[in-house]
Image: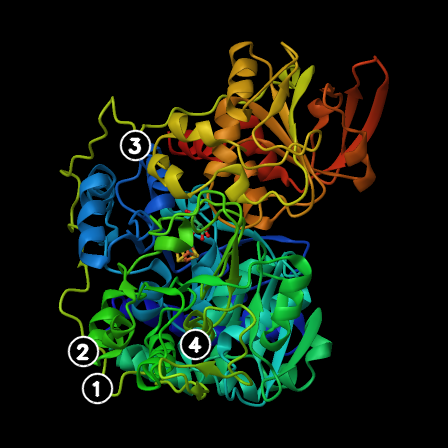
């Protein structure tokens, strides 16, 4: 039975009326995305047609999910909001803090020892405020959500960019910063700019070596890491119906890598099968009653060009398997062509590791398809040339896969089965063949492959592929291996070829699990004590941010002009730093240490204008802070790409950075800056980026008139006394300007609750 069938019934009871009303008001047939958005308006029934890409709209999400690495900061903020319980069903999942090293049993034990303070904190806050708690080892947030909470036509937000995974079950599920989640937990509306719509029409059927993953690898190649910004990607067409539900999840999951607000699919038989297989017959029955409301209107799918802002068509019959990378998930190469490209670019051909897992690709189907390749290695006497690591997506998947002998297949190949958790995907990996800075190649079924992400080594070339392709490449040990055409030499010296993968959409004997790792909260948690030790190095209660004064925005110094890609991993690295996610002062010591200084192309080496000496970014910034001097960070395109972690905004804010001025932002990061009471600005004229010099001083001459739709003016004073005056744009509306004026959105909530 579903966790919250009553809530879902309530959503469905209103859906028809609201969707019909939206159709009437907009005067056109509706996409699924619009149906879900218009049926989740904060004000109830739709009474106005929204302009896509323009209007800010208040929504009422049905549910919230948080993972351990972001939940700490989100809940520390929620604790300040003065509420008794969360206003909307919420869960916390412990998955990011478990390091992969020796295998599940030992790794989980170690994580429970080293991070018990954090897990205890999360468990007690959850218990106190009515939040469902999934223990370490229960699984990766997005798989657990797909298996337990996602439902067709629903809307959820989550403090992780891959919350979008739930689009595989027909939701509009959106990744947000913790402060956004706090709004909704505190019973307020959630604001989003009404998204644009990209339609992806799928025809044909996957065959041979091609997997769902290849659909999104291809789409990423077409749209690039910022092509989906501000848009919902809606998949439809006969090809969509031919994909499994978890395969749809994979596609939606990696929509985060193209910057899309979210991705979704209309309700269909594959989703119904998945709901029934995961013990949610009740949801399937309810969804069937309003089936047409849970997918786009026929007219839309018949004439997509008329109703979407952009349409892409992909023929699954001819789609080829891809490997994307290195260092960016949108560098798409069809498998047969990778050898040549690698040679040209000097990417190491030898593959050291094949990793299967992450929220993107750790379903039962994924494991079964990869296992069908692994089994062939055993049968055909092929000794894998790379090491293998597997992270199952949830305890339910792991238990079932073990029962059905799938994990055993991998173990026969010498694979290590890691915990049901993120592991290497987020740098929680104590790599047995540590490489320091040595150049090397790995392949994985994850979604992100930014520099240093998996193992901290900037020279690890990581390529993203489907689980079955990862298995094949790992067996061959070569990046240029093309299992469709190439053969391998086995231990008897014979030439053998791998057959195409086969898999099982769902376990034929059903899912099974002993302890799924869920802890329900107390009905009344008011007596629960939440403890944060004063001397903790992992947790620190928050102090409200002080509003920035207009006078402080004069005479500001440049902290860093970042060159090229600057993702949230560059701004607030994960891996070893995940340890400090609940302690703002400590984690601030990693602020922007991965960003490349445009003036010397070095990381963590910037000029301190007070001494003319160079130092690490956090150290130099702390010097400015001591003197009460505010600073500005300058950046390139798609600044803040990647994670939802609000630390990337809170840390600079805490250290005294007042403004971030870039060519363009990734959506979640821009909102995170606004929420924390900072200025997130874009160059009106991109070329002005080139005007910024290392010794510059900045005066925000008209900040007193900060208002919606009105660019701001910055006077840049160079070292020789010459000046440039530039215009910068912003997207703050009235409410968001209030956040800025109050010091943060949270300060405003507190004031309203007082
Ligand atoms: C990631 O994949 O980068 C993460 C770790 O899951 C993040 C969240 C975080 O930084 O904690 C995300 O994608 O939002
Ligand atoms: Fe975890 Fe990786 Fe998924 Fe992020 S992308 S939630 S780190 S598995």
Depth order, front residue of 335/700:
335
Residue 725's label in the rendered image is none
Mark 3 vs mark 2, CA separation in Å:
38 Å
> From the viewer's perspective, is 311 left or right of 362?
right
Q: Would you say residue 170 is visible in this rendering?
A: no
Q: Which residue is mark 1?
A: 509
Mark 3 vs mark 1, CA separation in Å:
43 Å
**Residue displayed at 50% across by 31% down:** 591
Number of marks present in the image shown: 4
Q: Indicate the secondary structure of the residue bearing disc 1.
A: loop
Q: Indicate the secondary structure of the residue bearing disc 3.
A: loop
Depth order, front residue of 305/603:
603
Mark 4 vs mark 1, CA separation in Å:
22 Å
Q: Which residue is mark 2?
A: 403
Q: Which residue is mark 3?
A: 538
Q: Would you say residue 178 is visible in this rendering?
A: yes
Mark 2 vs mark 1, CA separation in Å:
10 Å
Which class describes the residues within 10 Å of circle 3: few (<14), some (14-19), or many (20+)?
Answer: many
Q: Which residue is mark 4?
A: 468
Which class describes the residues within 10 Å of circle 4: few (<14), some (14-19), or many (20+)?
Answer: many
């Amino acid at each position: 039975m579903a966790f919250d069938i009553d809530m879902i019934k309530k959503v469905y009871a209103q859906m028809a009326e609201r969707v019909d009303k939206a159709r009437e008001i907009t005067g056109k047939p509706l996409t699924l995305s619009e149906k879900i958005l218009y049926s989740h308006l904060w004000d109830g029934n739709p009474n106005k047609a929204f302009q896509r890409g323009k209007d800010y709209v208040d929504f009422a999400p049905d549910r919230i999910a948080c993972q351990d690495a972001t939940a700490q900061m989100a809940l520390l903020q929620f604790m300040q909001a003065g509420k008794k319980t969360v206003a909307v069903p919420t869960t916390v999942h412990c998955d990011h803090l478990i390091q992969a090293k020796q295998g599940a049993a030992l790794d989980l034990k170690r994580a429970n020892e080293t991070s018990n303070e954090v897990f205890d904190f999360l468990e007690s806050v959850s218990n106190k405020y009515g939040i469902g708690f999934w223990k370490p080892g229960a699984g990766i947030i997005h798989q657990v959500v797909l298996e337990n909470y996602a439902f067709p036509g629903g809307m959820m937000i989550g403090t992780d960019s891959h919350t979008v995974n739930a689009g595989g079950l027909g939701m509009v599920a959106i990744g947000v910063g913790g402060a956004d989640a706090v709004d909704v937990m505190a019973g307020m509306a959630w604001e989003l700019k009404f998204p644009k719509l990209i339609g992806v029409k799928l025809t044909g059927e996957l065959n041979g070596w091609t997997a769902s993953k290849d659909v999104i690898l291809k789409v990423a190649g077409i749209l690039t890491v910022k092509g989906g910004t501000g848009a919902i990607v809606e998949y439809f067409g006969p090809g969509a119906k031919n994909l499994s539900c978890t395969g749809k999840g994979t596609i939606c999951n990696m929509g985060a890598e193209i910057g899309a607000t979210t991705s979704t699919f209309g309700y269909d038989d594959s989703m119904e099968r998945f709901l029934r297989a995961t013990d949610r017959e009740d949801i399937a029955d309810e969804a069937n009653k309003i089936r047409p409301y849970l997918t786009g209107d026929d007219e839309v799918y018949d004439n997509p060009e008329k109703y979407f802002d952009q349409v892409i068509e992909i023929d699954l019959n001819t789609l080829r398997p891809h490997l994307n990378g290195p260092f960016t998930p949108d560098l798409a190469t069809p498998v047969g062509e990778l050898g040549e490209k690698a040679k040209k670019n000097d990417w190491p051909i030898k593959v050291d590791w094949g990793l299967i897992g992450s929220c993107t690709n750790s379903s039962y189907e994924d494991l079964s398809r990869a296992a069908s390749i692994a089994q062939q290695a055993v049968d055909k006497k092929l000794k894998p040339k790379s090491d293998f690591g597997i992270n199952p997506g949830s305890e339910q998947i792991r238990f079932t896969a073990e029962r059905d002998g799938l994990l055993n297949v991998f173990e026969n190949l010498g694979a290590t089965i890691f915990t049901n958790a993120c592991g290497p995907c987020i740098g929680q990996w104590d790599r047995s063949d540590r490489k320091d800075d040595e150049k090397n190649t790995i392949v994985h079924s994850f979604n992100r492959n930014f520099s240093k992400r998996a193992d901290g080594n900037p020279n690890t070339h990581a390529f993203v592929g489907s689980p079955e392709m990862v298995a094949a490449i790992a067996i061959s040990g070569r990046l240029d291996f093309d299992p469709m055409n190439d053969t391998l030499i086995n231990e008897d010296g014979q030439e053998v070829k791998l057959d195409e993968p086969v898999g099982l959409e769902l376990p034929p004997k059903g899912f099974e699990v002993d302890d799924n790792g869920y802890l329900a909260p107390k009905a009344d948690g008011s007596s629960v004590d939440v403890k944060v030790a004063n001397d903790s190095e992992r947790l620190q209660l928050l102090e409200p941010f002080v509003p920035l004064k207009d006078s402080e925005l004069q005479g500001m110094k440049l902290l860093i002009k970042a060159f090229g890609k600057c993702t949230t991993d560059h701004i607030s690295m994960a891996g070893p730093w995940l340890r400090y996610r609940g302690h703002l002062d400590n984690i601030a010591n990693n602020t922007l240490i991965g960003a490349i200084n445009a003036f010397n192309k070095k990381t963590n080496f910037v000029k301190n204008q007070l001494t003319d000496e160079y130092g690490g970014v956090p150290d130099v910034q702390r010097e400015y802070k001591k003197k009460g001097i505010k600073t500005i960070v300058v950046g390139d395109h798609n600044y803040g790409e990647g994670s939802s972690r609000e630390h990337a905004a809170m840390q600079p804010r805490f250290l005294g950075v007042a403004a971030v001025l870039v060519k363009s932002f990734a959506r979640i990061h821009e909102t995170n800056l606004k929420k924390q009471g900072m200025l997130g600005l874009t160059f009106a004229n991109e070329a002005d980026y080139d005007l910024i010099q290392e010794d510059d001083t900045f005066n925000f001459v008209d900040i007193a008139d900060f208002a919606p739709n009105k660019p701001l003016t910055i006077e840049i004073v160079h070292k020789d006394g010459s000046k440039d005056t530039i215009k910068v744009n912003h997207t703050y509306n009235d409410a968001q300007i209030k956040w800025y004026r109050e010091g943060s959105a949270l300060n405003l909530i507190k004031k309203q609750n007082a």
